[in-house]
């Protein structure tokens, strides 16, 4: 039996940036057609660009409750990472209660963790991909529990349209086995690099004795460029024990930032429905635009959740997680 093969979510919110004076100039679909007057926004909830211009984040899509799975496609093909998993279709997933919604509107996604399998038989699990595509935004996931344990590999990520990795991949939440640290990773076409001296609280991945900053997903082993969170409550048993938390990814012309908050540290403005990342402190991971254009290397992303087992977890991450597991 596998431990903790359960993803227990409250909601996933997608917000778009709104610049009140620039609304008529926007042509990329980022701004809603109708927005509340600026006078109704709290001054403390105005986000600010490096050049001093202000904007607010307005709700674009909310994935939660009884309709959560209505907006996702179920992937039921062979695992691209060669995991020991059988991804099932929508009907099978609901029939076997691998996905369901509780009476209090909690979204459950899990793998089979009760069956005794014959040698060589793969375990049933779920991978879903959102139908909608986004080009920039603020993505906020409220997660009460996440899978962990022997051979387990869960992830919450976004991926671009077209041939991988030319529209980019952003791994927001990803852990493996008995690790206790989340890793944020970007995979791109050649030309995108992590800026290691940018402001973030995590640690760049070390490869061959030095920080690996090349995000090129076409390199041998597909390492991408990754940053490991410092907190042991960002993934694994401690994350579950203290009630989960919130992951947030901000993607705009200023770069791509990721925050994670354990339950007691979730900012009040998220609960209030008026998130302002500029008040959250440094992100755990940040891809600076100076060495990677976030609007060029990341295009039209859809959301993916999956739980797989073992598989071709790239060599860089395997070595990294082995080191962290024995700290």
Image: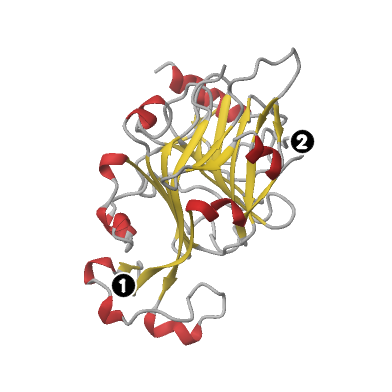
Q: Residues within 10 Å of mark 2 (few under 14, many from 20)?
A: few
Q: Quadrant of the C terminus?
A: top left
Work out whether 228 lies above or below 304.
above
- Of residues 285 and 146, the one nearer the viewer is 146
* Label 2: element kind: loop
Residue 239 falls in image quadrant = top left
Q: Nearer the viewer, mark 1 or mark 2?
A: 2
Residue at x-position 44% and y-position 81%: 34
Work out whether 42 lies above or below 257.
below
Q: CA distance from mark 1 to mark 2?
A: 48 Å
Q: Which mark is residue 78?
A: 2
Residue 116 falls in image quadrant = top right
Numbered label tally: 2
- Of residues 276 and 230, the one nearer the viewer is 276
Q: Relative to 20, is 318 on the left or the right?
A: right
| Image x and y of residue 14, in percent | 47, 60
Q: Is residue 217 visible?
A: yes
Which residue lies under the disc numbered 1? 52
Q: Relative to 40, is 190 on the left or the right?
A: right
Residue at x-position 77% and y-position 39%: 77
Q: Which mark is residue 237?
A: none
| Image x and y of residue 33, in percent | 48, 81
Q: Residue furthest top?
A: 119
Q: Residue furthest bottom?
A: 24
- Of residues 323 and 16, the one nearer the viewer is 16
């Amino acid at each position: 039996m596998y431990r903790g093969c359960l993803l227990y979510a409250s909601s996933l919110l997608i917000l778009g940036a709104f610049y009140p004076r620039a609304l008529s100039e926007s042509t990329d679909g980022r701004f809603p057609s109708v927005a509340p007057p600026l006078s109704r926004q709290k001054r403390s909830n105005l986000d600010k660009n490096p050049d001093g211009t202000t904007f607010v984040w307005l709700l674009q899509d909310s994935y939660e409750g009884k309709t959560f799975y209505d907006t996702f496609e179920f992937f039921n093909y062979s695992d691209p990472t060669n995991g020991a998993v059988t991804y099932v279709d929508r009907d099978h997933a609901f029939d076997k209660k691998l996905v369901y919604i509780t009476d209090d509107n909690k979204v459950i996604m899990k793998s089979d963790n009760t069956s005794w399998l014959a040698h060589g038989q793969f375990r049933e699990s779920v991978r879903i991909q959102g139908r909608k595509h986004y080009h920039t935004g603020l993505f906020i996931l409220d997660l009460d529990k996440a899978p962990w344990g022997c051979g387990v590999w869960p992830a919450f990520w976004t991926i671009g349209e077209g041939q991988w990795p030319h529209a980019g991949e952003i791994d927001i939440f990803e852990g493996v086995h008995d690790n206790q640290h989340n890793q944020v990773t970007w995979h791109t076409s050649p030309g995108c690099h992590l800026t290691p001296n940018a402001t973030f609280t995590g640690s760049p991945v070390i490869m061959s004795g030095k920080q690996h900053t090349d995000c090129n997903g076409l390199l041998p082993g597909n390492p991408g460029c990754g940053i490991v969170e410092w907190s042991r409550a960002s993934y694994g048993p401690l994350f579950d024990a203290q009630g989960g938390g919130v992951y947030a990814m901000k993607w705009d012309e200023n770069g791509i930032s990721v925050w994670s908050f354990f339950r007691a540290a979730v900012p009040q403005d998220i609960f209030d429905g008026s998130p302002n990342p500029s008040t959250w402190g440094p992100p755990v991971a940040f891809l600076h635009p100076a060495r990677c254009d976030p609007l060029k290397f990341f295009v039209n992303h859809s959301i993916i959740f999956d739980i797989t087992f073992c598989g071709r977890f790239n060599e860089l991450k395997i070595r990294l997680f082995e080191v962290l597991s024995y700290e």
